[in-house]
């Protein structure tokens, strides 16, 4: 049964698509069955996986509009076990069409329900706004993954997002949780970036992933070639970071599954694992959420 994860941040340019594409590819390389659902009218995940504009190709707009089945639009990618539900700019029109529709907030949840049995992870690449499309993604998701750029005002934008998540959890999707926070575009040369990392980890505690994604030219170049970073430059720092993120993401999935099944064997906490990996790291004390 797939875990549905919305990759969301209302601020643009924080690495949502880069994280969606490369985390999805990394999980697929770890033998997970992954579906990337491009739900951003900018279609960046679609382009980043090598599919150019094609007005005749059915897309998520057709699925949400009831004119196609999800299974009929899925595209294989160059990464085994990774599939894509493509998007085109016409998706922007869906918001207008849904305004007067019944159960408009649940359209995406209903669409993805049959696909759960076919994948281990479904990643939704959301638009950089708190729109009706993003609302649909948050109602459909089991959890949210929040990329946060290591720059000034990062926490301020995330605080607004957390308040939105609380409201959605209270009224539309009670099980919604924070999968984790991914720190992106980290520049180790600046004290500001280091301070942002400390602030985010202090705020989110165990919800913040240990892996920090650095600024990396190869990561910026890869989408223009329509490839995940692992196929473009597997030896780059960006590839190393996203593969580590995928492994950490899988660890959390496995820990959650073991907890659900009542496994009682002792495993180190996220904080203990961080300390073992880096004795000088900021070690969170306890988890945070949106309760």
Image: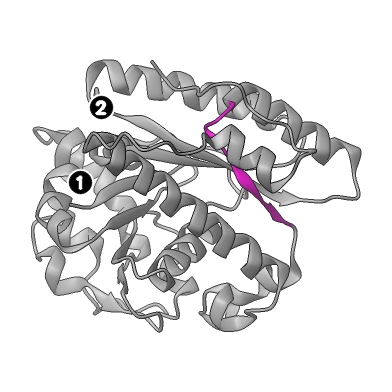
| Pointer 2 residue | 175
Q: Quadrant of residue 88?
A: bottom left
| Vertical position of residue 251 compared to residue 181: above or below | below
Q: Residue at x 24, y 78 (%)?
A: 57
Q: Residue furthest front?
A: 265
Q: Quadrant of residue 11?
A: top right
Instruction: Provide residue 60's location: percent of width, then percent of height.
Output: 24, 61
Q: Is residue 211 magenta?
A: yes
- Residue extent of the magenta highlight: 205-214
**Is residue 268 rendered to the left or right of residue 190?**
left
| Pointer 1 residue | 108
Of labels 2 and 1, earlier in sequence is 1
Residue 137 visible (yes or no): no
Q: Quadrant of residue 170?
A: top left
Q: Secondary structure at mark 2?
A: loop
Whole-angstrom CA distance, mark 2 to mark 1, is: 16 Å
Q: Quadrant of the C terminus?
A: top left
Q: Which mark is residue 128?
A: none
**Is residue 244 rendered to the left or right of residue 149?**
left
Instruction: Provide residue 13's location: percent of width, then percent of height.
Output: 62, 50
**Is residue 225 rendered to the left or right of residue 166?**
right
Q: Residue at x 54, y 82 (%)?
A: 231
Disc 2 crowd rating (10 Å Cα; few below 14, some 14-19, many 20+) is: few
Residue 42 visible (yes or no): yes
Q: Is residue 24 magenta?
A: no
Q: Secondary structure at mark 1?
A: helix
Magenta residues: mostly which secondary structure? strand
In front: mark 2 or mark 1?
2
Q: Residue at x 55, y 64 (%)?
A: 243
Query: Marks 1 and 2: in contact by CB < 8 Å?
Result: no
Disc 1 crowd rating (10 Å Cα; few below 14, some 14-19, many 20+) is: many
In this view of the protein, which residue sits in the foreground, 56 or 271? 271
């Amino acid at each position: 049964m797939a875990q549905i994860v919305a990759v969301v941040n209302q601020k643009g340019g924080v690495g949502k698509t880069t994280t969606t594409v490369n985390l999805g590819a990394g999980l697929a390389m770890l033998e997970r069955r992954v579906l990337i659902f491009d739900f951003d009218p900018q279609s960046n995940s679609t382009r980043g996986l090598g599919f150019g504009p094609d007005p005749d190709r059915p897309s998520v707009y057709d699925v949400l509009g009831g004119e196609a089945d999800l299974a009929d639009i899925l595209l294989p990618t160059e990464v085994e076990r990774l599939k894509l539900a493509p998007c085109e700019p016409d998706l922007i029109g869906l918001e207008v069409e849904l305004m007067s529709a019944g159960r408009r907030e649940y359209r995406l949840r209903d669409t993805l329900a049959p696909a759960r049995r076919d994948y281990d992870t479904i990643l939704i690449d959301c638009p950089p706004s708190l729109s009706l499309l993003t609302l649909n993604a948050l109602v459909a998701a089991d959890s949210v993954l929040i990329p946060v750029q290591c720059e000034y005002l990062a926490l301020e934008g995330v605080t607004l997002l957390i308040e939105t998540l609380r409201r959605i959890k209270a009224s539309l999707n009670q099980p919604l949780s924070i999968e984790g926070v991914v720190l992106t575009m980290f520049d180790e040369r600046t004290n500001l970036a280091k301070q942002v990392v400390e602030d985010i980890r202090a705020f989110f505690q165990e919800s913040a992933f240990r892996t920090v994604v650095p600024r990396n030219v190869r990561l910026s170049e890869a989408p223009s070639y329509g490839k995940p970073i692992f196929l473009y430059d597997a030896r780059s720092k960006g590839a190393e970071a996203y593969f580590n993120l995928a492994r950490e993401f899988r660890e959390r999935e496995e820990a959650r599954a073991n907890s659900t099944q009542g496994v009682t064997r002792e495993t180190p906490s996220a904080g203990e694992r961080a300390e073992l990996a880096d004795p000088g790291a900021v070690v969170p004390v306890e988890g945070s959420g949106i309760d």
